[in-house]
């Protein structure tokens, strides 16, 4: 059939099972938006307040479902406003496809109005990007983009389309089924071929790995975000229980292993628990599953698990030996590898090792037990939200102290229920991500826990939440400061609080009201529990201004460059 480029974009998105796209229109992309208007019954377009919100929404959609999220923007500033969201998805291996349109081809390279080299800008922060110069190449490019985004280690892909390509016509051949989307990579695309050919370890390699696990006396699993990406949470649980191995989690793995399980040690690294950090330090085997040994986890690389054997399983060969030298490794999908490993793992009982770990679990910062009555204990806040919202609720965060409190204290039970920016640490991420998660999961609740510093960056997305009547409950952890930076200023910079005190507006309740959203204030734990339950039970959007002390610290913490066992447990340490 004869279709123009805009029609081909819509048809290819429908082929890929896309039902929702997030975006913001502009001149260069008008042809596509006109086609979206004609196909409202097939694809739901969500108009965000800002393109960055659209990119984060696509990311939240992807993280909450495992599907590819899609966002769109026009040329120039529309495209560059997607960059932070694309980089966020890249750092956390989240599959999104970003579609931008550029000025017509004859105007490229002439500093034309709203022209930008978006493929050049995004080259370092995408798995791959494309500029489509001919309409005849458009369908194949879109199909290839989706395969790249979700194959192997997932990540973002950008497609840039000059405006005339969206209007030009060509013959379009629909796919009969998605299996036909398998692409015969052309000569010259060797850099992409590895995306489609995931490694498969041999039976001998699997057996050798099983022997290493079976022989360990003090093993610990270091679980990373790859567990969630590969849908391997149940297999992780099966391995841990069968082999009786405690589990430490990176921030991106929080929700991969049930908090209620006695083998869960909590987060590892800079703000990890005493039990998690000491277990890694004193272990004789660190089994890293879908984890990349971030600097926030390992801190002093030379002292990280220095007396332990490290064995790494990851889909990306580039991660092996990148940050930590390993004694052994398997390259491939962690879920598929665990499925082959499990039958070879012995049922074990590490009673003496677990007894030592139970002693470490008792070591906890006293500050979370001793707390003034005229503000809210962050630990209480996290536990209260979970008690009322339940295991099925998605929790999104911004970045800062509130994010770390959630990672430390929220008792996650189900995978994909924690959505946060880990690698890039993007303030302003969570509001858009909450929107994406809510659209992807309309029958489940979404609670967005935000810091007052981060939330002001993208609070304009309250317009999106209000317009689409999304029942997202936003808890603004209001401590009147950029708390994580202030903590470092307090401990390492002589209490010189340079540009971190937020002793000015807005009034969050009034701001919420401006968007037609109910606002609440809570200055104590009793008030918070009452208003949060009321907000959640209302089934509508809400903003809760929750007062937290300005000097409420995130503890434990590891000072920069120190080994992870050198934790500060109290600020008097």
Image (cartoon, grey):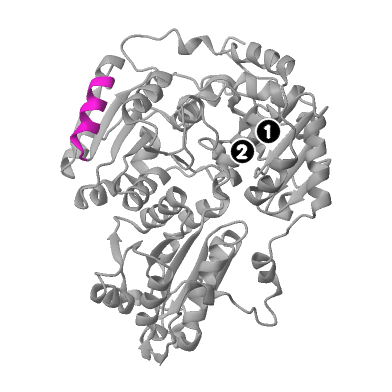
**Nearer to the camera, 153 or 550:** 153
Which residue is drawn at the image coordinates 67% and 76% (left, top)?
189
Q: Are marks 1 and 2 in contact (CB under 8 Å)?
A: yes
Q: Position of residue 445 (x, y in %)?
A: 31, 40
Q: Secondary structure at mark 1?
A: strand
Residue matched to label 2: 236
**Nearer to the camera, 125 or 541:** 541
Q: In front of the other: label 1 or label 2?
A: 2
- Determine whether 536 is above or below 149 in the image: above
Q: In which quadrant of the rendered view does residue 130 lie?
A: bottom right
Q: In screen coordinates, is 536 left or right of 19?
A: left
Magenta highlight range: 529-540
The answer to whether one can see residue 326 in this image is: yes
Res. 221 mark: 1
- Tell me the crowding category of disc 1: few under 14, some 14 to 19, or many 20 or more residues within 10 angstroms, Cα based: many
- Determine whether 114 is above or below 134 in the image: above
- What type of secondary structure mainly makes up the magenta span? helix
Q: In which quadrant of the rendered view does residue 107 lie?
A: bottom left
Q: Quadrant of the N terminus?
A: bottom left
Q: Position of residue 25 (x, y in %)?
A: 30, 68
Q: In screen coordinates, is 389 left or right of 38?
A: right
Which residue is drawn at the image coordinates 66% and 31% (left, top)?
242
């Amino acid at each position: 059939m004869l279709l123009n480029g805009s029609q081909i974009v819509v048809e290819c998105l429908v082929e890929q099972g896309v039902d929702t796209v997030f975006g913001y229109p502009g001149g260069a992309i008008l042809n596509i938006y006109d086609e979206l208007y004609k196909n409202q019954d097939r694809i739901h377009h969500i108009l965000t307040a800002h393109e960055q919100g659209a990119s984060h929404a696509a990311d939240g959609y992807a993280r909450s479902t495992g599907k590819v999220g899609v966002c769109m923007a026009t040329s120039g500033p529309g495209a560059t406003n997607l960059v932070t969201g694309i980089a966020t998805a890249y750092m956390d291996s989240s599959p999104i496809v970003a579609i931008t349109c550029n000025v017509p081809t004859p105007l490229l390279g002439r500093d034309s109005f709203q022209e930008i080299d978006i493929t050049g800008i995004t080259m370092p922060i995408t798995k791959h990007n494309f500029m489509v110069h001919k309409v005849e190449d458009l369908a194949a490019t879109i199909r290839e983009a989706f395969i790249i985004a979700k194959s192997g280690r997932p990540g973002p892909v950008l497609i840039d389309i000059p405006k005339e390509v969206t209007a030009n016509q060509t013959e379009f051949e629909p796919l009969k089924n998605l299996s036909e989307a398998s692409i015969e990579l052309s000569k010259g695309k060797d850099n992409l071929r590895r995306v489609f050919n995931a490694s498969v370890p041999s039976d001998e390699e699997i057996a050798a790995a099983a022997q290493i696990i079976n022989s360990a006396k003090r093993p610990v699993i270091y679980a990373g975000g790859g567990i969630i990406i590969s849908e391997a949470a149940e297999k992780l649980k099966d391995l841990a229980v069968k082999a009786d191995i405690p589990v430490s989690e990176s921030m991106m793995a929080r929700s991969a292993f049930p908090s209620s399980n006695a083998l869960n040690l909590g987060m590892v690294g800079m703000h990890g628990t005493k039990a998690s950090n000491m277990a890694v330090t004193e272990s004789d085997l660190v089994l890293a599953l879908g984890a990349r040994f971030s600097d926030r986890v390992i801190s002093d690389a030379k002292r990280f698990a220095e007396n332990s054997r490290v064995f790494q399983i990851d889909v990306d060969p580039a991660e092996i030996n990148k940050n930590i030298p390993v004694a052994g490794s398997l390259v491939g999908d962690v879920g598929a590898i665990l499925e082959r490993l499990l039958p070879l793992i012995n049922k074990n009982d590490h009673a003496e090792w677990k007894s030592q770990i139970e002693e470490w679990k008792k070591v906890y910062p006293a500050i979370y037990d001793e707390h003034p009555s005229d503000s809210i204990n962050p630990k209480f806040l996290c536990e209260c939200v979970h008690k009322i919202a339940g295991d099925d609720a998605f929790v999104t965060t911004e970045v800062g102290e509130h994010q770390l409190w959630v990672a430390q204290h929220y008792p996650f039970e189900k995978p994909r229920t924690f959505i946060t920016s880990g690698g890039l640490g993007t303030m302003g991420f969570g509001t858009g991500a909450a929107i994406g998660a809510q659209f992807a999961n309309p029958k489940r609740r979404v609670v967005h826990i935000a810091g007052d510093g981060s939330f002001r960056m993208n609070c304009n997305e309250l317009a999106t939440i209000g317009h689409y009547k999304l029942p997202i409950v936003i808890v603004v952890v209001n401590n009147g400061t950029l708390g994580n930076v202030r903590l470092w200023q307090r401990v390492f910079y002589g209490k010189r609080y340079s540009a971190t005190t937020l002793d000015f507006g807005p009034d969050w309740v009034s701001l919420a009201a401006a968007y037609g959203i109910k606002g609440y204030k809570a200055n104590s734990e009793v008030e918070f529990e009452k208003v949060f339950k009321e907000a959640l039970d209302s089934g509508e959007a809400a903003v809760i201004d929750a007062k937290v002390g300005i000097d409420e610290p995130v503890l434990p913490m590891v000072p920069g460059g120190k080994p992870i066992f050198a934790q500060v447990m109290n600020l008097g340490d």
